[in-house]
Amino acid sequence: FDVRQTSSAWCMRQLRLVPLTAAALFLHRSPFPRRPSMGSRQPVRVCPSASCRFVDPDNDKEWVERNRSLPGYVRLVCISDTHSQHGSITTTKSPEGADDTTPLPLGDVLIHAGDWTMDGEPDAIKELSNWLAGQPYEHKVVIAGNHDLTFDTKYYPRLWRRFHDVQHDCEAVRASLQHCTYLEDSGTTVKGLTLWGSPWTPTFFDWGFNLDRGEEISEKWQLIPDDVDVLITHGPSYQILDFTKSRVHAGCADLKREIQGRIKPRLNIYGHIHEGRGVAFDGTTVYVNAASVDLMYRPIWPPFVIDVPLDRTKPIPLHFDDA
């Protein structure tokens, strides 16, 4: 377990690594303070039992560049919740109001964990497809989120009037998403890694891909195979990077039960809760909330770059690409 020394300033302005002990996970006790200050960021804290390496790009830019094509590894570039602002997601965190056109980091696979749009408008889906066509990744894997309404063929016909002036053809909108592999309760194999994608989240203000907690949503999680390396869900597990501004844990306990009790993936990538962005580790699975926008829907956060070794006995090093 190799942790590169990071500056306190970088830690304070960056991502939270929440150490999750086995006891806290079993008892569903929150790893967050009971009444955290939402106006300040906690420093990165490293769980001593974690088997992953964190690289501070301020000090290790040459290391990241030198190892961008590491033999035996698959590099994932992960984003989520871009809300039609994917073109503004860059390698570095930009000053507010700055025009930063820095491209995304190089990698093998681009993963988008849902909420590409604000409400699933057809033009927004076409724009996403055009953007994906211009991204230089060998593979691009995406799932939908609760905002991508026109992809939920059961929900949209019932509630389209809440969002759109006219009812759009869901099948036509789905067909317009190109230049990627779309996963919905389905999987794929990419460069030796097995991936599974699921868009569902517990009922939350009655948006798309919402299901009630308990039996209804559990049926979706039970579809996930046991041999998944990378699980892509739109929402988080309960108490794992899911704490909201309203001081509630919005994650799914049923998903957590499946992940920790049966599936045990090496990596779970998601978004949904913008203020929960960060990384956590429970001793088996690395959890990454890769939300790209903040609570004000400003695209201020860079992507996560994750090198996943094909050798399952090796740790997963996480590179935070931010200046």
Image (cartoon, grey):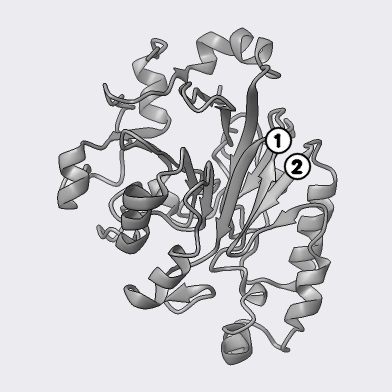
Q: Residue 281: percent from the left, percent from the top?
A: 35, 35
Instruction: Left or right? Give the position of 104 relative to 241.
Output: right
Instruction: Left or right? Give the position of 144 relative to 108.
Output: left
Determine which residue is flagged by label 2.
139
Contact between marks 1 and 2 (CB within 8 A): the answer is yes
N-terminal-most mark, 1 or 2:
2
Determine which quarter of the picture holds residue 111: top right
Q: Given the image, on which type of amino acid does mark 2 rest? A: His
Q: Which residue is nearer to you in this view: 57 or 315?
A: 315
**How many circles with numbers are drawn on the protein?**
2
Q: Residues within 10 Å of mark 2 (few under 14, many from 20)?
A: some
Q: Residue at 31% of width from left, 33% of height from top?
A: 283
**Secondary structure type for disc 1:** loop
Q: Given the image, on which type of amino acid does mark 1 rest? A: Lys
Q: Which residue is nearer to you in this view: 305 or 233?
A: 233
Residue 203 seen from this side: no
Determine which residue is flagged by label 1.
191
Q: Residue at 44% of width from left, 63% of height from top?
A: 221
Determine which quarter of the picture holds residue 237: bottom left
Q: Residues within 10 Å of mark 1 (few under 14, many from 20)?
A: some
Q: CA distance from mark 1 to mark 2?
A: 9 Å
Q: Residue 192: percent from the left, percent from the top?
A: 66, 35
